[in-house]
Image: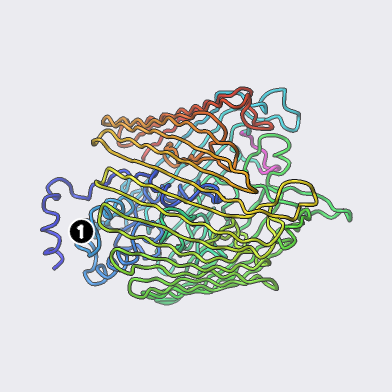
Amino acid sequence: MKWRLIIPLCLPLLTCAQEYPRKEVDLERLADELFGFQDLDLNYEDLYENLALLLANPMNLNKATAEEIRFVNILTEEQLQNFLTYRNEMGRLLSVYELQAIPGFDLQTIYRIVPFFTVQDPTYSFHTSLWERMLKEGNTYLIMRYERTLEQKRGFTDAASETQRFTGDENKLYMRFRSSRPGDYSIGFTMEKDAGEQITWNPSNKQYGFDYNSFHAQLMNKGRIKNLIIGDYQLQFGQGLLMGSNFGFGKGAETITTIRRSNLGFLPYTSINETSYLRGASTTYEISKYIYLSGFYSSTWRDATLAIDVSEEDFFSSLQTTGLHRNLSELSRRKRLREKQYGFVLSYQKQKLDAGIIYHNLTYAIPLQRNPQPYNQFTFSGSALQNMGGYINYTLKNFTLFSELAKTYTRGLGLTSGLMGSVTAKLDVSFHYRNYQRNFYSLYSNAFAESSQPQNERGIYWGWRYRWNRKYSMTGYMDLFRFPWLRYRIYAPSDGHEFLFRFNYQPTRNVLLFVQVREESKARNRTGSESNLYLIDNGIKRNFWLNADYGLNQKLSMKTRAQFSTYTINGVKTNGMVLVQDISVKFGKLSLTGRYAIFDTEDYDNRQYVYERDVWLAYTMPALSGIGKRSYILIQYDISNKLTCWLRYTNTHFTDRETIGSGPDTIDGNTRNDIKLQIRVRL
């Protein structure tokens, strides 16, 4: 039966290739749809890298779980259930061509999902040596990257004070090695030095060559040990309320799938963000056919500002998250605080039910004691934090229900719960409810929330997506939220709302036109005399996007976008805009991408974000504020199947200022030029 379905659909293609043509994914479009808005204060760089790495190591469709497929955020719940049903009834897929035989899978969907997945040769054996698998599969690579700002910052000159003067050179260096095979193994390391940092060997100061070093070794599916990681790792369980790494998307044009977190478990950490990883060991063990026990231990050093109180006892007042250690001031906070974490997850996974209980313990070597402010009376303080909770995910026909409930020991509760699915083949809907009490603390969470942490917030979200046909579709959401207690810059309980509407027209696979409108209303302290300190006003920000992506032929594609915004508070209205023109050209092994953009914003509240293409695994989405222009050119050349080079040059010119940046990062002048060179060697 399987071949009767496949042969009529695929015979014209089988004469051309053995595998489905693997097109380059438009990560710019994915960023627009999945990443929401940069001002949501998410860790977009790590999120982008996790997607890019998935492209480099496509998952096996015959082994991928529903949670892993959901993380890609492309398939509707109806399409996902149709795929799982097909796989259960028909057995192993013989080719990705079979996706065409599954109800609800049109060519547009297949083209989008194919780069993330593959179909493994059923005759492949893992009994070869690790070295042979590393070389045979082609997923072993080495990356070397060099970056530099051509203008000199004050921190590199005598104009900076002794504590602010940078100790290292102006070059930013990056190196990464990784070898991996999905479902089998992963090993690798990452090293980075920011501009201004030194390369030095000083173990007494926890400096080992590059300023930042990361490593990991992972084994998967070795008997009852389903996952084992030694070194740096990240974790994602339940809905990320207690254990969540950089796998949570914000609110954006993808209004359905991004509200749900995928239960991915432990994954290697390979990013250069110096605050988001755990270091130690983690494992998942199969107790029985449907019951799994996952446990982890982590011991890391964090950047922190240390102080001494009147009783001469040490405490730290804040954690530092920039990862910069360029001068004496920044070095004084480098790796000053020992953080230890451990926990376990006992889970039950059978077909459409996925449930578990979670325990998480975090301790600091010295206590946290923040500088008292009206808004942070309920912010976490102390040296120990214990949380316990449970989650449940259940699929019923074309709908999936998901929820996680957690409690901080002797403190408050946190709840995240939702539903999403396909009402018809054309209409998808989503609903989400959240309630995070003001004394609920979860410091490693990525649960769905308006704030960066799930605390002091209640909210209801509705999302929908409707497709008339292949060409026309609409998406939208409404989010109503309330903050029962004070927040930073909001010294009173407050509420707000956010909505988005987007209309898409895609006449062909290479052409996409859309119009998007977004409004957000959120309170802010009223400026003025101290007598008005606790009076607040609601500020309303509106964004308007007009976009056209069009491929003129196989070698030439263009993108035109206009973004406008307004911000109104206390009767004062300000504006901002950016106009963008992109062009991409391919000449065999050579690819060129260029952009020219002009921007004009009256204040920082109207800053504009537009994703920029960059070298592989690098993420760039700058905040354009003020008046000026920004342009870049990206050159990619595939010297061979084993060697690829990138060169990126960026120019930013302002007309409303004489200096760029602040403090030791100040550039005297109104122009900044940056270069970036990267080489990737496949072994």
Residue 383 in view in this figure: yes
331 vs 141, left or right, is: right
Specify the segment rendered in magenta: 199-206
Left or right: 424 in relation to 345? left
Q: In this orientation, which residue lies closer to the viewer: 498 or 60?
A: 498
Q: Look at 25% across and 47% down and name the residue there.
A: 507
Q: Which residue is mark 1?
A: 100
Picture coordinates of residue 24 (x, y %)? 31, 43
Q: Which is more toward the observer, 347 or 251?
A: 251
The residue type indicated by label 1 comes to: Gln
Image quarter hosting the N terminus: bottom left
Residue 477: percent from left, percent from top: 45, 59
Disc 1 packing (10 Å; few <14; some 14–19; many ≥20): some
* Residue drawn at x 61%, y 29% as measured from the top left: 660
- Residue 473, image x and y in percent? 32, 55
Tell me if I can see residue 366 in this picture.
no
Q: Regarding mark 1 in the picture, which secondary structure is present there?
A: helix
Residue 431 lies in magenta, yes or no?
Answer: no
Q: Residue at x 74, y 57 (%)?
A: 368
Q: In which quarter of the view is residue 213 placed?
A: top right
- Position above or below: 2 against 161: below
